Image (spheres, grey):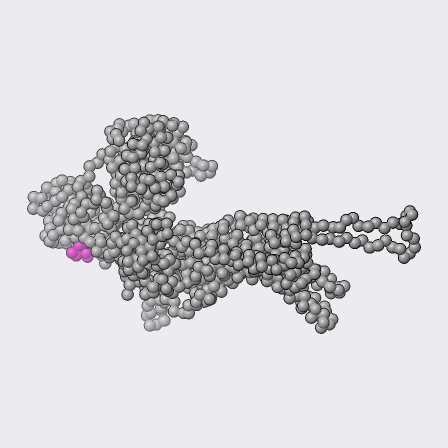
């Protein structure tokens, strides 16, 4: 059962701005990345999915409910983590998450318990009794996540969850989101403009551009291996290339790596032995694969991934 | 626009540069040289990147030390504005102007002989021609950034400074901006951009300057920087036809500090990068193990940065 | 840092690792009505400064304590000397209006400006509430707070007075007098809650909202006072008794006639109260109860106008509040 389904979804604002057009997609359970939609497109989509805005065309269903008619039902089962700052500084994390738990419809005691659990799961311990104004950005993002989690949602909508976090904080947040998506049994949709994050934790990807769907696919299909093996040796690359060519293997030179068509086991062993014989320092031997970024490369920058990139001239 | 230039005339040189505001030392004794090409200024928020950019562009005076561009200090030197273009982080565009008006105004401020033509060229470089007649307040964040870049490029500066230029851009706009900057760098200009997003710096910068809490932690190519961290063992993930056999062989080598059998292959911690990388292929052959993949796991800018900041 | 996912296990002999992983919530989920009620009580407490730091409670509780002061004094006076209340129930609110202004100028921004300042509204609107529920809960909460602020001193005064009352008819008289007073408190709640909330909802800066509300209330009071003075006419200097000279009257039964001056109010004075919310309530009270002890010039024919404007203003400001919150963004 799809977690989110849209059919020909469109939204045109009175001023003439078209935020979404002809959007048809189905989001399956798991962790899905939403990429490319910035500004109007993203916020419009989120508002429609939460049942706060009616589309001008088409329809959308979230967790089986129609967004036009069942907005409240949807909002009771969807947790939303906004992108911008939205936390009052002068209440404690516990108070805020408990209050918002009640706003989701949890009875008073349940709200307290769920809040405590949500804060535990996001990794806030004794800090939770301090006022939010004293928190670091990383802790604030966790509080935002906890308030989305407090009502045991069936779907989490996370908008740029690593905004403002330093690399260590980003890692921690991504690991947390990954855990939630895989162990907690909650479907997650992450809106992010950082493609490396999407590649790291998402199973599926939805790419939107100009308000319309650009691509919706599983990550694995988008980051498939490409039939090249990239070999990086710290020195002696030319000798290695010559050696391999002499053995009948096609070699393409890149700036840093040699590309060899992936073939049989014999090829692997040939490469290994060549390196061993020449005594070269092997730093990398990696299957090239596609990157999500390729989806957005314009004509000028697009190198067909199946072709090796030309050696780049250095100024 | 002219593309040939003497590198020396545009080299940016900082020597023992320090800048403080009251008790806060924003930039602490930084010495660096920036030449043609794209340099990424990387650091956590509040590390002093913006301050550095403002000192190089002449808006701030160093409290101590010197900043020069082509040998001249930019501070209180209006002539420097011919050589330098700055794209600041904050929204410094007049929302009620169209992009064209804004860039033409910038051209006029630089007293260019033909401001309209220069503006057209700049707008074309950033691919904003189609939307150039709409007012800036109708633009998305990415388009505003492009307008700012156009205004900074209109006088064909040899040095271009950009403060967090990719903020708010979607992937396509980002890729396009990166192409633009890469092209400018290849043509011989000195491009310095700051970012706290590693992915962007990794993609675009030829050289990286890592700033942490006002101090310059490292410069250069990040892979080379990683090699220089000899006190941290390099981590490799190796996939083979017989992980355990290779593990046995490797643990006997003094270059290897640790080997872990994970579900996805072998994780090797090599204290001596040079020796290990030379031994690996030989050891595999001798053990009769086929190598399928060798991946340096902590060679990314992310790991390098984490190590630098953690230090 | 985060909960490590250690798998539950047991060795059958008493040693156990418990499963404290994520557990879905299977309990009751309450509907909109309960949520609005929860928000209502939350806001009601917030109006008196509860739910935040102790500093937030100072003004609400201090003004409330001062509100009780006249009641305490009255109770003491009646218990001590008997007689009627020095400050009648129906005059209580009008004469303590400055305390009320202070209270409401602080309470209204507390309820709505904070959420605006910290952009907390998306956290509410992404929940199973309707757009209108948020302002509704805030409105009812502030109205309740105002009614309590104005009404509790009256009730206290009532209870204190009948405690020292000796006859059933005395109790009845007090009860009869209390009711219009409580109705005045109710009117304050209905009129001032949407008005002050609407003003407060225009800005996230609490100090600004407090200032705006205070200035509005004080200015309208001042203006209506001016209008009252302008429209007041006495009918000439008072007559002077002659005790000496040719026309002098002698004798013990020729006391100087009592001082008497007739004061009349023209239309300006009578209608001037329409610009002042306080007088709006007072004028409506005079008109509705045919009161003769008004604090303001008797509106006479215009009394209906006061009542109509009261209702109209309440409706318009409440509507404005509703419209204000329809446009707030989520994402």
- Classify the position of the N terminus of chain A by image quarter: bottom left
- Classify the position of the C terminus of chain A by image quarter: top left
C290 relative to A297 in the view: left or right: right
Image height check: is B261 above or below B299?
Answer: below
Q: Locate residue A54, reporting x and y percent.
A: 36, 58
Residue shown at the point (19%, 39%) measured from the top left: A312
- The answer, for residue A122, to whether it is visible in the render is no
Residue shown at the point (13%, 43%) measured from the top left: A252
Would you say residue C39 sits in the magenta stretch?
Answer: no
Residue shown at the point (79%, 54%) measured from the top left: C260
Q: Locate residue A25, reporting x and y percent.
A: 27, 58
C83 relative to B173 in the view: left or right: right
Q: Locate residue A101, reporting x and y percent.
A: 43, 62
- The quadrant holding residue B115 is top left
Q: Which of A224/A217 is in front?
A: A217
Q: Which of A59/A279 is in front?
A: A59
Residue shown at the point (65%, 58%) measured from the top left: C301
Q: Which residues are magenta?
A: B239-246
Image height check: is C172 above or below C57?
Answer: below
Q: Which of C242/C294 is in front?
A: C242
- The quadrant holding residue A219 is bottom left
B185 relative to C236 in the view: left or right: left
Would you say residue B245 sits in the magenta stretch?
Answer: yes
Q: Locate residue C256, reporting x and y percent.
A: 86, 53
A311 relative to A185 in the view: left or right: left
């Amino acid at each position: 059962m799809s977690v989110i389904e849209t059919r020909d979804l469109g939204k045109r604002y009175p001023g003439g701005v078209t935020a979404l057009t002809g959007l048809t997609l189905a989001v399956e359970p798991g962790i899905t990345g939403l990429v490319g939609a910035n500004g109007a497109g993203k916020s419009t989509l989120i508002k429609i999915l939460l049942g706060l805005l009616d589309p001008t065309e088409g329809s959308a269903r979230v967790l089986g409910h129609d967004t036009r008619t069942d907005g409240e039902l949807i909002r009771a089962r969807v947790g939303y983590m906004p992108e911008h700052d939205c936390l009052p500084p002068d209440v404690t994390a516990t108070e805020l998450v408990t209050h918002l738990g009640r706003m989701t419809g949890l009875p008073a005691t349940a709200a307290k318990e769920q809040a405590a659990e949500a804060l535990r799961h996001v990794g806030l311990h004794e800090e939770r009794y301090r006022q939010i104004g004293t928190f670091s950005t990383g802790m604030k993002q966790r509080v935002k996540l906890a308030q989305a989690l407090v009502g045991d949602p069936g779907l989490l909508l996370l908008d740029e969850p690593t905004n403002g976090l330093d690399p260590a904080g980003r890692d921690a947040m991504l690991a947390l989101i990954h855990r939630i998506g895989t162990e907690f049994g909650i479907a997650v949709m992450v809106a992010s403009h950082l493609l490396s994050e999407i590649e790291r934790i998402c199973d599926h990807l939805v790419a939107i551009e100009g308000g319309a769907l650009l691509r919706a696919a599983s990550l694995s299909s988008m980051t498939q291996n490409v039939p090249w093996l990239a070999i990086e040796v710290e020195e002696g690359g030319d000798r290695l290339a010559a050696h391999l060519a002499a053995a009948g293997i096609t070699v393409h030179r890149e700036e840093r790596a040699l590309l060899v068509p992936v073939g049989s086991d014999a090829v692997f062993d040939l490469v290994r032995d060549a390196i061993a014989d020449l005594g070269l320092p092997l730093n990398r031997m990696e299957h090239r694969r596609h990157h999500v970024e390729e989806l957005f490369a314009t004509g000028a920058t697009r190198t067909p991934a199946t072709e090796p990139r030309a050696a780049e001239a250095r100024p | 626009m002219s593309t040939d230039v003497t590198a020396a005339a545009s080299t940016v040189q900082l020597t023992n540069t320090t800048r403080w505001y009251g008790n806060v030392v924003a930039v602490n004794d930084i010495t660096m040289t920036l030449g043609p090409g794209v340099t990424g200024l990387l650091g956590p928020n509040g590390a002093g990147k913006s301050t550095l950019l403002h000192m190089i562009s002449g808006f701030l005076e160093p409290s101590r030390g010197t900043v020069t561009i082509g040998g001249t200090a930019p501070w209180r030197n209006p002539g420097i504005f011919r050589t330098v273009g700055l794209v600041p982080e904050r929204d410094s565009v007049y929302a009620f102007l169209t992009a064209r008006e804004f860039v033409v105004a910038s051209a006029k401020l630089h007293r260019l002989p033909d401001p309209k033509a220069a503006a057209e060229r700049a707008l074309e470089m950033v691919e904003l021609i189609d939307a150039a007649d709409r007012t800036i307040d109708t633009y998305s964040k990415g388009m505003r950034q492009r307008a700012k870049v156009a205004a900074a490029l209109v006088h064909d500066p040899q040095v271009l400074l950009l403060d967090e230029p990719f903020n708010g851009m979607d992937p396509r706009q980002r890729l396009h901006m990166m192409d633009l900057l890469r092209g400018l760098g290849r043509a011989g200009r000195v491009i310095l951009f700051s970012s706290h997003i590693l992915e962007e710096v990794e993609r675009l910068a030829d050289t990286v300057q890592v700033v942490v809490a006002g101090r310059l932690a490292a410069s250069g190519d990040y892979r080379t920087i990683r090699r220089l961290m000899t006190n941290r063992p390099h981590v490799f993930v190796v996939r083979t036809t017989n992980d355990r056999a290779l593990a046995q062989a490797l643990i006997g080598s003094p270059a290897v500090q640790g080997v872990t059998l994970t579900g996805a292959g072998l994780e090797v911690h090599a204290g001596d990068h040079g020796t290990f990388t030379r031994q690996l292929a030989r050891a595999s052959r001798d053990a009769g193990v086929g190598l399928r993949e060798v991946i340096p796991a902590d060679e990314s800018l992310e790991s390098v940065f984490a190590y630098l900041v953690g230090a | 840092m985060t909960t490590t996912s250690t798998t539950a296990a047991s060795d059958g002999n008493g040693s156990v690792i418990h499963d404290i992983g994520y557990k879905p919530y299977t309990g009751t989920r309450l509907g909109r009505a309960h949520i609005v009620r929860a928000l209502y009580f939350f806001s009601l407490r917030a109006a008196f400064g509860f739910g935040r730091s102790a500093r937030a409670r100072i003004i609400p509780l201090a003004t409330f304590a001062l509100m009780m002061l006249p009641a305490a004094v009255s109770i003491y006076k009646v218990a001590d000397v008997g007689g009627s209340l020095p400050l009648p129930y129906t005059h209580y609110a009008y004469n303590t209006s400055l305390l009320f202004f202070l209270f409401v100028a602080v309470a209204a921004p507390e309820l709505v400006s904070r959420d605006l300042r910290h952009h907390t509204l998306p956290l509410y609107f992404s929940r199973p509430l309707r757009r209108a529920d948020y302002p509704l809960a805030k409105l009812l909460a502030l109205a309740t707070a105002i009614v309590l602020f104005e009404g509790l001193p009256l009730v206290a005064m009532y209870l204190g007075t009948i405690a020292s009352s000796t006859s059933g008819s005395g109790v009845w008289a007090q009860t009869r007098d209390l009711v219009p007073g409580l109705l005045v408190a109710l009117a304050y709640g209905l009129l001032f809650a949407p008005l002050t909330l609407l003003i407060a909802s225009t800005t996230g800066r609490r100090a600004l909202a407090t200032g705006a509300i205070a200035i509005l209330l004080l200015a309208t009071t001042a203006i209506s006072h001016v209008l009252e003075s302008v429209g007041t006419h006495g009918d000439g200097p008072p007559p002077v008794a002659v005790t000496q000279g040719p026309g002098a009257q002698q004798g013990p039964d020729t006391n100087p006639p009592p001082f008497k001056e007739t004061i009349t109010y023209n239309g300006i004075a009578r209608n001037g109260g329409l610009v002042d919310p306080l007088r709006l309530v007072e004028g409506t009270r005079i008109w509705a109860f045919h009161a003769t002890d008004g604090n303001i010039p008797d509106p006479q024919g215009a009394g209906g106008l006061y009542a109509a404007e009261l209702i109209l203003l309440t409706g318009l400001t409440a509507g404005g509040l509703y419209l204000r919150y329809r446009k707030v963004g989520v994402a």
